[in-house]
Image (cartoon, grey):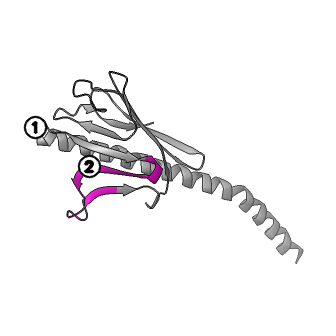
Amino acid sequence: MIELVAVMMVMGILAAVAIPKYFDSLDGSRVDAAANRIAADLKLCRARAVLKGSSSMESAKFYTGMEKYTLWLTPDIDDPSNYYWVNLSNASYPVDLVSSTFTNQLGAKSVMSISFDMYGRPWCGNSPVSPMVDGRIVVRSGSEERTVVINPVTGLATVQ
């Protein structure tokens, strides 16, 4: 009986140490998955703009208060009769969309949308002559945070 109690105490101590680390690793996995999804969707938006090859742009819009974003006027991959929306709070990796900030050469900031031209270059704001110079989207789960950075020259998105 003493051996059983000793084994149970050791297992309890191990569980007390392991469970917080397990949940921390879940937060890291969730935020990595969400940031990689955003980066992949921005690459899709950029690729659609390049493939169109016209003067029209493709845009992504971020709604930080609602934890959602959309590839503007892009059909949903699973249901082409609807537009492409991602709700980060309902996804298999629930995270908070902390911020989305895009700045153009004139210093104007947009907290909502980024557009790509037919060359894949990123643009933001209302100026047709001022391309983006800085673009960042921040996601968080628990204590883990990742930033998706858009290269102002190539328009490619990477996770940091």
Given residues 159 and 128, the one toward you in this image is 128
Relative placement, left or right, of 8 versus 83 is right
Element carrying mark 2:
strand
Which x, y percent locates residue 53? 11, 38
Q: Is residue 100 magenta?
A: no
Residue type of the residue flagged with mark 2: Trp
Seen as rendered, the residue at the extreme front is 126
Please name the residue that numbered disc 2 is placed on.
Answer: 72
Give the quarter of the figure containing the N terminus.
Answer: bottom right
Relative placement, left or right, of 111 versus 60 is right
Element carrying mark 1:
loop
Please name the residue that numbered disc 1 is placed on.
Answer: 54
Which x, y percent locates residue 75? 21, 57
Which x, y percent locates residue 69? 36, 50
* 3D distance between C-alphas at marks 2 and 1: 17 Å
Residue type of the residue flagged with mark 1: Ser
Label at residue 38: none
